[in-house]
Every structure is written in C-alpha cells, then in structure tokens.
Image: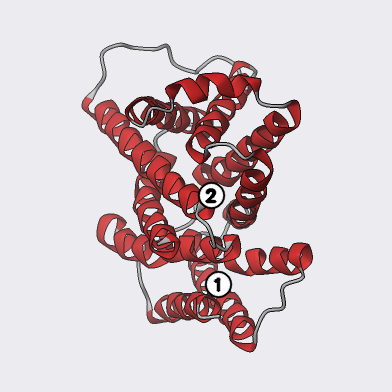
Amino acid sequence: MWIILATSAGAVLGCGDVFLKYLSRRLKPSVACFGLYFLGMLVWVPILSLTGRSQAFLQSVYLPTDIQLLVLGRSLLQLFAYAPIFLALRTLPLSTYSALRALSPVLALSAGTLMYGDRPSVAACLGIVAILLGVVTVSRTDYRRTLSASGTSCPRRHLTLSYILAVSAATCSAIMPIYDKNLLSIAHADSFVLQALSDLYRLGLLLVILLFAGRPATPLSWRLSQSAKNVSRALAVAALLIAGGEMLSFYAVSLPGSLPSVVAILRRASLPVSAILGKLVFGEALRLEKIAGIVAVVLGIMLINGT
C-alpha cells in the first residue's frame, strides 16, 4: 500500500512542477512560496475538521519542546526543498530540473548507508551509476544548448547557480522521508497533526522572511487583470498538488513496514511526468540525447526499487 501511495505522490508532484514552472517567471520567489504555503495550509482546515483531528491539532502546542524543535526542523527542511525551485526553474527546462531532482535516490541510499548501516546490493549500485550517467547526460545537453544561445558570461553563471539550487533542493528532498520516519518514531503523535503543525511553522518562517524582504515594487491592486487571475489559479492548483503529494508521501512513511529510502526513490516518479508535460505544455525540446538520459534515470530508479 505504501509503495502505491509513494508512487502516486511522485506523479502528483510531477504535475505540480508544471505549475511551478509557469509561476517561476511570473512571481517573485518569496511571494510564490508564501502563496503556495498559505494556500497549502488552508487545505488542512477541511481535512482536520472532517477527520475529527481539529482538537488534536489545537492541543499540539502542548507537545514537548524537543518534539516542537523536531517539527520546526522539518519545516526548515521543507522550506529549503521548495524555495530554490522557483529560482532554478527560471533558467532550467522542466525535464532537466526533474532529472537533477532524481539525484535524491542516490542521496537517500547514501544517507541510509551512513545512518543505518545499509549495504546497497549490486542492482542498487548499478542503479546509482545509471542515475548519475543519466543526470550528467541531460544536464550537459541543456548546458551546451543554453550557452550556445548566448555568448555572454551571465547565462553561464545563472545556469550554474540553477544547477546548484536544483541539487540542493534534491538533497533536502532526499533527507525528508528519513527525517519524517525518525520524527514519527520519536513523537508518537498523529501523522496528519504533525504535518499540519510543520506546515504552520513553515508558513511562519516564510512570513518572517517576507517582513525583512522590503516593500513590494508595485502597490497592491484589488482589480486583477486576466493575467493576474491566471497566475492566481495556477498558484491555487500548484498548492493543491504539492500539498496532496506531500500528504501522500508523509502518510506512506507513517505506514508500518515502509522504507523511507524507497519512498524517496518512488517520489521521483515525477521525472517522466514532468518531462512529458514539459514537452506538451512548454514545447521543451526532447532530443535523443536527453531522452536517453531520462530513460537511464528511470531505469536506475527501477533498479534501486527492485532491491
């Protein structure tokens, strides 16, 4: 059951990436993140009410201090997993960004080896090699193509920074299922309540950042243009998809017998979804070299999952 939930989470997050790509060029990263997290937090209101967890959520303020700090740590991890996305997607094609995020299975296996003494099998090692080769192939294709489009040094710096941001987001995304598993084993609280509390803390952290970010360049207008309405709709859909994907992933980790490293791997089911939608929606080029790289990444994920 948890394998199906984790795979579904990856597919849902892949659909959410399409809307994040759309928003990345139309909103400031801080504003986009706040809108995404605020709307995602509103999703919890009917969920907690309909499932009878409202009282438990209100009483979560009485959790021990060490548990509160662990939940706050999860909020920071989530913030660093999604905040760089809006900067990276301004430059990177959706398929390249998704391929870089596919590094998280490698990082998850490495974390499992260091923390739990896991020994990857031969198939898992082959999967790691396939993922690394696929990511390098996809990345080189778009890197050369972007640099050939402009001879200035500015795109090179921007592109390199985008790669670094995407890899840092992949690192936080890989750590998250392992962190969630440890949090659930220590807290002994309802998984929905913990996740809602974490999202509330995350929203508060981002609000503090916005308060120190300065005033907006343009005054707020209550009359929205058609373009602004489209952005608002895209933000709402993105919030629903991201919140839904994270809920499925967190619930999968909370189920008995679930393996956080495998959950991190299955979350990368977003790669083929993002690549296909990137081609259909944004007209991104899918050359043979890039397709081969994406196939190598998917095969690597399947090899790791088969272990």
Q: Residue at image x 35%, y 34%? A: 235
Residue for point 47% across, 49% down: 251
Give how far across and how far down residue 281 sits, in percent: 27, 55
Residue in front for this viewpoint, 286 or 101: 101
Q: Observer-nearest residue: 152 or 298?
A: 298
Q: Nearer the viewer, mark 1 or mark 2?
A: 1
Sequence-wise first label, 1 or 2: 2
Vertical arrangement, residue 97 with respect to residue 123, above or below: above
Q: Where does the image place residue 179, in percent across and percent down from the top left?
A: 65, 49
Q: Residue 259's quadrant in the figure?
A: bottom right
Residue 270 in view here: yes
- Counting every numbered tag in the picture gives 2
Tell me which colouring the rendered structure shows.
Answer: secondary structure
Q: Is residue 284 visible to us here?
A: no
> Which of the image's four quarters has the C terminus?
bottom right
Amino acid type at mark 1: Val
Q: Residue furthest bottom?
A: 122
Q: Position of residue 249 (x, y in %)?
A: 47, 52
Q: Work out how far the residue at label 1 is from the one at label 2, CA to CA, in angstroms.
A: 16 Å
Circle 2 SS class: helix
Residue at the disc numbered 1: 135
Q: Residue at x 55, y 77 (%)?
A: 304
Q: Position of residue 160 (x, y in %)?
A: 63, 57
- Secondary element under disc 1, as helix, strand or loop, is helix
Badge number at residue 2: none
Question: For mark 2, does the 10 Å Cα neighbourhood hold few (<14), some (14 to 19), or many (20 or more) residues?
Answer: many
Specify the amino acid type for callout 2: Ala
Residue at the spot of label 2: 88
